[in-house]
Image (tube, rainbow, N blue to C red):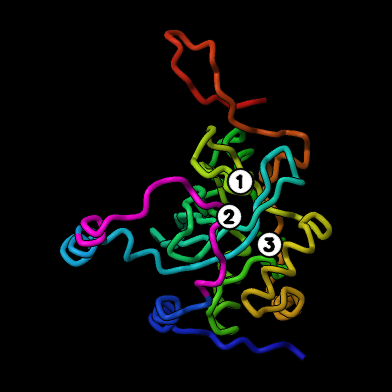
Amino acid sequence: MQKSVLRVAPALFSFLLLLSCGGDNTSSNVQSPGAEKAGKTNVLEAGADLLQDKTPLSKLNMYLDGFHFYNGDTKAQMEAHHYCTKINEDLTQCIIYDGNTDKAKIMGVEYIVSEKLFKTLPAEERKLWHSHVYEVKSGELIAPGLPDVAEHELMEELVSTYGKTFHTWHTDQDLALPMGHPLIMMGFTKDGMLDPTMLKERDERFKVSSEEKRKNRADIPTPAIQPGANAWQQGEIRQLKIDNTAQGGHHHSSPNR
């Protein structure tokens, strides 16, 4: 018997995204040095919050929680809290935090493109991107606070997309300040890769079951992964390094091949 899926009207879906909760349960990985905020700072912040326009931030209306690993090192894993906005039907941009409290640190960014756009990318560019098929189908990727029906529909949209991710602050390494250079991240592609303890702790915090989500998403079609994505699986690892030999001693990032 075919499973019926309730379709959520676009306007209602956006409304649900805005109302979704499921946050404020994951503290930052690090406590950074620095003096406590002064009273004057708090007053200035309150005034700026009231008076200044923050249109781009107001569009961050989608919250996704998943996991990344450093390209070239599948054992270096961390949870990633994505706050995203859809630029259009084929392009999404996300700010990534190491938690979901007011002390969370910005870890990096992720850009998400549809399969249609991914197919337009040059072959070398594709090697920087990862697929989302397994993350969706396995239940590892969740949209905290969304009702199951709305989350299911969102995952139907994400299953065929591709992400390009850079982490700029490596708080998983207990770095209290954003030291080091940006690193390219990848997503998991099969069972047994993600640390089960990390997944279990995440599920407990959000009161969800990845296994139940896997079963619930069994009806989502599994698209073929486009050539070039997840290039690390073929030994084509792309990572950034600092070139200290650049003229004048300036630091430049370059692909580490």
**In this orientation, which residue lies closer to the viewer: 29 or 163?**
29
Task: Looking at the image, tell me whether mark 3 or mark 1 is earlier in sequence order.
Answer: 3
User: For the residues marked 3 and 1, what is the alpha-carbon distance in whole angstroms?
Assistant: 26 Å
Rendering coords of residue 172 (x, y %): 63, 49
**In this orientation, which residue lies closer to the viewer: 70 or 130?**
70
Residue 97 to residue 71: above or below? below
Specify whether 107 is left or right of 225: left
User: For the residues marked 1 and 2, what is the alpha-carbon distance in whole angstroms?
Assistant: 7 Å
| Span of residues in magenta | 23-43
Query: Which residue does the numbered mark 2 point to in the structure image?
Result: 29
Query: Which residue does the numbered mark 3 point to in the structure image?
Result: 135
> Any magenta on residue 35?
yes
Specify whether 113 is left or right of 40: right
What amino acid is at disc 2?
A: Asn
Rendering coords of residue 14 (x, y %): 41, 77
The nearer-to-camera label among 3 and 2 is 2
What amino acid is at disc 1?
A: Asp
Specify whether 202 is left or right of 100: right
The nearer-to-camera label among 3 and 1 is 1
Query: Which residue does the numbered mark 1 point to in the structure image?
Result: 174
What amino acid is at disc 3?
A: Glu
Quarter of the image for the C terminus: give it: top right
Total numbered labels = 3
Residue 186 to residue 83: above or below? above
- Please tell me which residue is depicted at 63% across the width and 32% down the height of the picture: 239
Residue 162 to residue 13: above or below? above
Q: Badges 3 and 2: C-beta atoms under 8 Å apart?
A: no
Q: Badges 1 and 2: C-beta atoms under 8 Å apart?
A: yes
> Any magenta on residue 257?
no
Residue 13 position by quadrant:
bottom left
